[in-house]
Image: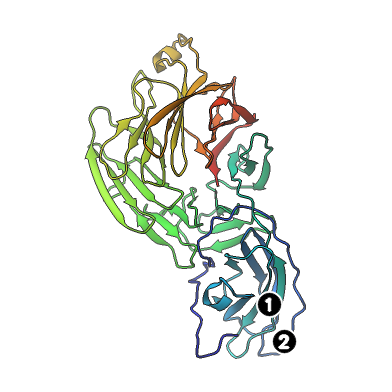
Amino acid sequence: MIPAAAPVPQHVEGTVVFKSMLTIAAAAALVVGGALPAQAASTSSTPSAPTSVRVTGSGGDADLTWGAPRSGPSVTGYTVMVTPIKGQPDRGVDRLPATARWDHFDSLRTGTRYTFTVRAVAAKRSGPVVSVQYTAKAAPTRQSLFALDAQGSVVRFGTGSTSTGTTVATNAAGYTADDRGDVFVPSADLTSIVLHPVGGGVARTVATGLHLTADLRSDVAGNLYWADSVSGSVTMLPIDGSGPRVVADFGTVKYGKHAWVVSRSGIVTAYNNSPFEARIAQRSAAGVLTVRAFSYGGVYPVVGGLQSDDAGNLYLTLSQDGRDGQYPWVEVRAGESALTRLTTSDAFEYGATNSTSFRLLRSAEWCTQADELYGTCDIDRSLASEFVIGRDGKPQTRTVTGVTAGSRGSHVGVMDTAGDVFIDVDRAPSAGLWRVPAAGGAAKQLSSAQFTRLLVV
């Protein structure tokens, strides 16, 4: 217990129950402990013990969950404690509101056995304590590929050369995932965020009363983002327990040709095309917001996809109307106000970025949309080369084999830290999910099924 003279700050506002310091631990199982018997009996003025107390986690992170007491007076809050307290903020104690059903802890030491306790608090007395224990295990550093299948389920793949998919959440349109492997899904009514824990188990709500769109994003720290359905502004739910707040907007008028993106490090960019100019509102990972605008010549472009690296460089795929049917990838360097096309020739292209680089898979040949409609597009559509821009900004080209481009359009893939690129091809002869090695060479098919919303964490 913390002495009365040393009050513990409350970490939670409303029904948001995140509490954490920053972590990039990847998924690995923890030893799960069962609840020990309550230490005291309930009286009429004392709430009974919390129910269904359980701890799950991965790497250096753990989640404690519980249900409401079955008897006693109205609960006004919960007190959660962890021991040993080394590395834990506020001496390992959290005081949470009555709506809380979950608490998150990180910075846990490998091989250390931890004890968590939770008790309900009423107006006059606190209820009995319930304890659970587990031991943290080392986490692997390999990332995972997440993708949404045709049935709306999230499937997880390893990023190695051989991998089979595992379904981790259903009815998951608009999902995102954090670096631990937890999956977050907007509720059907778009007012709540539901967590599907990496280790399995019962899904639970972590935030309510929101104005969501079916498009959650996340950064490496575990903060969650969405475009607010009322204001339209990009909103962040911080992992530190504070409430949702606006981090970027699209200006006075949000035109139909707009997009937004969050980099791995937490750089948030809102890109808005008006009929006259492009407006970029960019919030750095440190919270500094800058806005810049620039005019462009020629056709008013439609943003088909937007990606960002951790330096704030932006990569966009544009749709240009007309008989040609081009979908070129362009770059906006950090702090600059100009679109620069990445290549000078047309091709069927698939782009992907990670924290430090951008890669563009390109077909051997190309034809116009008009030729394709008239049946005269007899070309080699194989993805034969990979255009690479590294941290130094110098382009390189690698040879690729084994995969053929799909339909005409804006194709956005994902990339892991090693530089492997993952794409979905939407039609034969290469329909399915593919991995292209960082060094180039032969692509490998992971699945013949169709997937959308690819994500590597």
Q: If the image is split into quadrants, where does the N terminus sit?
A: bottom right
Q: Position of residue 152 (x, y in %)?
A: 60, 42
Q: How many marks?
A: 2
Residue at 52% across / 47% down in the picture?
174
Mark 1: which amino acid?
A: Pro
Q: Secondary structure at mark 2?
A: loop
The residue that label 1 is drawn on is 69
Q: Which residue is mark 2?
A: 42
316 lies left or right of 430:
left
Percent coordinates x, y for residue 84 in the rendering:
64, 75
Q: Give the answer, above or below, for where 330 lies relative to 84.
A: above
- The CA span between labels 1 and 2 is 10 Å
Q: Amino acid at mark 2?
A: Ser
The label on residue 295 is: none
User: For this rendering, which residue is in front, 62 or 110?
Assistant: 110
Residues at circles 1 and 2 in contact by the CB criterion of under 8 Å: yes
Is residue 274 left or right of 213 when viewed as pictured? left
Q: Is residue 247 in view?
A: yes
